[in-house]
Image (cartoon, helix red, strand yellow):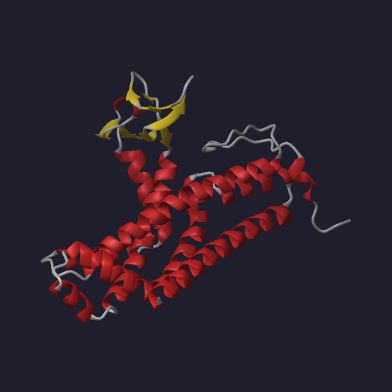
């Protein structure tokens, strides 16, 4: 008798998954496909959150180091507040705000363009194929719901917002330290040459700051990917949620836990490798 038996991965899953993204899944499909859906959902929420967190963290860092009256203190207070509140608590706060304060699907809030927000989630335009080519499908409010386009659930939004805000607060301090490490003389030289503020930031400040911020930024990216496992707290079917259901369904605890460990290890190694490669290329470009 072997300690690990992977034959259960070929057996029918026996459970449905409420949110499958672009994949198609039903209870009669094999268990391994359920794990793939969970992995897809993890990546679907982690990658956009990573991008949003980076942009938001950079914006907060620029405000934190600016001389704009009031904005520096506001950014500092926001960063401190988010950093000192546990991520799980922030996740629950976002979730209950979304399901309690938003209007019902019959009276969705029209944000801008084709964006509609309600307790049913966020609907947005999405390309769909027709007989000859792809065309953009726009969501529209009807009698009972918002139809057309694509949508994400409140669970997805809560996880994405919590991960983005929490990671951005830590990235803001990383970026701030990198910005403050840039010699002031470089910015003064760019100002003397007639560069605008945006040109000084884009062409001088950020490239120089990258020399010091990439390693700690990598750590925050790794934390974001691992923190996405907290999505199970609000019922979002990520890898941990699907694996837990598969464990209860099959009774194969060691195998399911091993799958989770292997996937998160692989994601962490891929992220670290990508960031290290970027760091080396940037260092070589700076030397050239």
The N terminus lies in quadrant: bottom right
Q: Judge from the rendering whether residue 7 lies leftward or rightward of residue 166; answer left or right.
A: right
Q: Is residue 26 visible?
A: yes
Q: x and y percent of residue 172 in the render?
A: 31, 66
Q: Is residue 177 left or right of residue 269?
A: left
Could you tell me which residue is drawn at 26 percent across and 70 percent down?
Answer: 204
Asked whether, in this view, residue 267 is left or right of residue 47, the answer is right
- The residue at 41%/34% (across/down) is 151
Residue 135: quadrant of the picture: top left
Left or right of residue 38: residue 284: left
The image shows a total of numbered marks equal to: 0
Residue at image location 37% in from the left, 50% down from the top: 161
Name the outermost residue toward the left: 69
Question: Which residue is at the far right?
Answer: 1
Say which of 248 and 246 sits in front.
246
Image x and y of residue 29, in percent? 69, 34
Quadrant of image for the C terminus? bottom left
Q: Is residue 239 above or below residue 152?
A: below
Give the answer, above or below, for where 39 lies relative to 122: below
Residue 81, quarter of picture? bottom left
Question: With respect to residue 254, does 37 lie above or below?
Answer: above
* Residue 216 visible here: no
Question: Most extreme residue toward the front, as rendered?
Answer: 288
In front here: 251 or 54? Answer: 54
- Seen from the viewer's position, the closer of residues 20 and 278 is 278
User: Which percent across, then down, holds residue 256?
Assistant: 68, 52
């Amino acid at each position: 008798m072997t300690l690990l038996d992977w034959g259960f991965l070929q057996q029918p899953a026996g459970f449905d998954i409420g949110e499958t993204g672009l994949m198609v899944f039903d209870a009669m499909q094999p268990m391994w496909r359920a794990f793939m859906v969970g992995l897809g959902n993890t990546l679907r929420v982690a990658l956009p959150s990573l991008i949003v967190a980076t942009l938001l963290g950079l914006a907060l860092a620029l405000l934190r180091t600016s001389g704009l009256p009031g904005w520096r203190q506001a950014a500092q207070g926001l960063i401190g507040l988010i950093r000192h509140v546990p991520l799980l608590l922030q996740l629950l706060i976002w979730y209950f705000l979304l399901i309690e304060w938003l209007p019902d699907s019959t009276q969705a809030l029209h944000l801008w363009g084709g964006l509609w927000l309600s307790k049913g989630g966020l609907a947005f335009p999405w390309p769909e194929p027709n007989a000859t080519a792809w065309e953009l499908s726009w969501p529209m409010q009807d009698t009972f719901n918002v139809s057309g386009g694509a949508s994400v659930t409140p669970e997805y939004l809560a996880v994405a917002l919590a991960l983005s805000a929490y990671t951005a607060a830590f990235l803001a301090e990383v970026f701030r330290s990198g910005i403050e490490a840039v010699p002031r003389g470089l910015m003064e030289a760019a100002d003397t040459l007639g560069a605008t503020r945006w040109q000084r930031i884009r062409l001088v400040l950020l490239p120089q700051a990258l020399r010091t911020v990439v390693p700690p930024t990598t750590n925050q990216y790794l934390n974001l990917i691992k923190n996405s496992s907290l999505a199970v707290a609000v019922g979002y079917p990520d890898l941990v949620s699907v694996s837990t259901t598969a464990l209860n369904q099959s009774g194969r605890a060691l195998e399911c836990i091993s799958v989770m460990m292997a996937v998160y290890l692989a994601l962490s190694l891929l992220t670290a490798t990508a960031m290290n490669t970027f760091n080396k290329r940037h260092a070589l470009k700076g030397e050239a």
